[in-house]
């Protein structure tokens, strides 16, 4: 039997917004531009996590999945111009949302933080080509081995 976790409306809102702002930060992080691939990966990852993540985090993703795409598009409309201004704005929003973690306990906080980190990486690397994600690390490892033999 699976445990059922329920949260207050405020917790759903704050942690859902933390997920949203994490995906937006990952999207703008390298170049200040949200590419369609990054947006699509954010939507996909949020949906997948609504049924495949830890039981105590799953309700947050389930709650967010219903309106993630609409909120993502709405939130990015409020972003300021300029790369540094965007990052500072997003980080402030994220810090505000994550303030709720102090009331959630250390285990939940650690697991939720790990989940956000994984989500960030997935969205950030959405534009990675086959070469970048598969062949480049293989070739780099091969070159490092060759350099060690000299």
Image: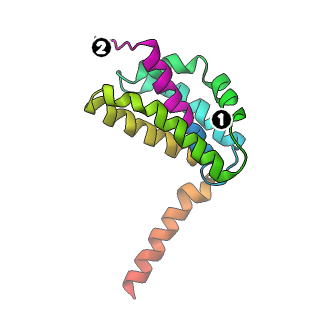
Q: Which mark is residue 8?
A: none
Q: Percent position (x, y) of residue 30?
A: 61, 54
Q: What colour scheme was applied to this rendering of the protein?
A: rainbow
SS for dot 1:
helix
Q: Please identify the quadrant where the N terminus is shown.
A: top left
Circle 2: element type? loop
Question: Which numbered marker is on residue 3?
Answer: 2
Residue 88 is a magenta residue: no
Give the quarter of the image for residue 68: top right
**Front-most of 105 and 138?**
105
The reply to whether discs 1 and 2 touch (Cβ–Cβ < 8 Å) is no
Q: Residues within 10 Å of mark 1 (few under 14, many from 20)?
A: some
Find the distance from the CA under tag 1 to the CA under tag 2.
Answer: 31 Å
**Image position, residue 76 (x, y; %):** 68, 35
Please indicate whether residue 31 sits to the left or right of residue 23 in the image. right
Q: Which residues are magenta?
A: 1-22
Which numbered disc covers residue 40? 1
Quadrant in which the C terminus appears: bottom left
Asked whether 3 falls inside the magenta stretch, the response is: yes
Residue drawn at (38%, 82%) of the image = 148
Which numbered disc flags the more N-terminal residue, 1 or 2?
Answer: 2
Q: Residues within 10 Å of mark 2 (few under 14, many from 20)?
A: few
Is 56 left, or right, of 60 in this rendering? Answer: left
Q: Residue at the location (41% across, 27% down)?
A: 53
């Amino acid at each position: 039997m699976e445990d059922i976790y329920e949260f207050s409306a405020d917790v759903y809102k704050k942690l859902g917004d933390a997920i949203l702002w994490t995906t937006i930060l990952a999207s703008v992080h390298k170049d200040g531009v949200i590419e369609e691939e990054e947006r699509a990966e954010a939507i996909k990852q949020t949906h997948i996590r609504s049924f495949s993540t830890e039981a105590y985090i799953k309700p947050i993703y389930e709650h967010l999945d219903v309106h993630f795409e609409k909120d993502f598009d709405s939130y990015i409309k409020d972003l300021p111009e300029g790369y540094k201004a965007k990052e500072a704005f997003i980080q402030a929003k994220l810090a505000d949302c994550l303030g709720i973690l102090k009331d959630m306990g250390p285990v939940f906080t650690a697991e939720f933080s790990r989940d956000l980190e994984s989500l960030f990486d997935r969205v950030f690397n959405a534009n990675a080509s086959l070469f970048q994600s598969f062949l480049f690390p293989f070739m780099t490892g091969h070159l490092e081995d060759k350099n060690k033999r000299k």
